Image (cartoon, helix red, strand yellow):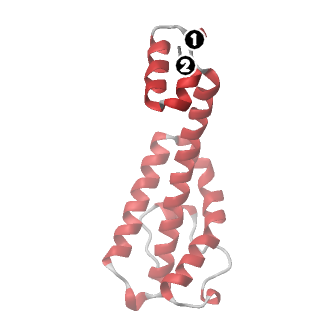
Amino acid sequence: MVTVSESYERDYYAWAMKNAQLIRQGKLSEIDLNNIAEELEDVGKSERRALRNHIKNVILHLLKWRYQPNFREASWRQSVRNGRIAIHEIVTESPSLNRDIAQLIESEYSSAQADAVDETGLSASTFPPTCPFSESQVSDDYWPD
């Protein structure tokens, strides 16, 4: 007979359903605590990773908007708008991630800047060394001139 923790490696879906059933039945001594804890941590990391990716994408498109005004495209505006919506949804569902936004803007700027260099063909020196956009400018209805 396969134990609950062994089924984690063999059949993830069956493992998840079995553990959910055991929890609902109050059979807490039978659940796979270690793997459940790991999965819960991964869910949290996944939310933060999604927030980070949306922040980076918004910064990238705001940079392109600011530094290539003659090439502005509707798709850039749509990318910024969709990213801001996603950021708002993530922090609405997980308000504790709000405290990470400023740090994520700072840490993701260099990657967004590198992508902007690649996508625009502009020199890296065209862009400021630190993010020119505040937390509210990244998440609110701000558009650079």
Residue drawn 50% across and 8% down? 26
Task: Assign a secondary structure to mark 2.
Answer: helix
Residue drawn 58% across and 66% down? 134
The quarter of the picture where the C terminus appears is: bottom left
Q: Give how far across and how far down residue 13 sits, in percent.
A: 43, 30
Residue drawn 39% across and 91% down? 70
Q: Give how far across and how far down residue 27 sits, in percent.
A: 53, 8
Q: Which mark is residue 4?
A: 2
31 up-or-down from 118: above or below: above
Q: Amino acid at mark 1?
A: Glu
95 up-or-down from 79: above or below: above
Disc 1 and disc 2 in contact, CB within 8 angstroms: yes
Report how far apart the C-alphas of labels 1 and 2 lie in the structure: 8 Å
Task: Assign a secondary structure to mark 1.
Answer: helix
Q: Which mark is residue 117?
A: none
Q: Residues within 10 Å of mark 2 (few under 14, many from 20)?
A: some
Q: Nearer the viewer, residue 60 or 20?
A: 20
Query: Would residue 46 be seen by someone viewing this image from the given angle?
Result: yes
Q: Is residue 13 left or right of residue 41?
A: left
Look at discs 1 and 2 and give the one toward the viewer: 2
Q: Give how far across and how far down residue 109 sits, in percent.
A: 61, 70
127 up-or-down from 57: above or below: below
- Name the residue furthest front: 1
Q: Which mark is residue 30?
A: 1
Q: Total of numbered circles in the picture? A: 2
Query: Would residue 137 be seen by someone viewing this image from the given angle?
Result: no
Q: Is residue 112 left or right of residue 77?
A: right
Q: Give how far across and how far down residue 30 sits, in percent.
A: 57, 11
Q: Amino acid at mark 2?
A: Val
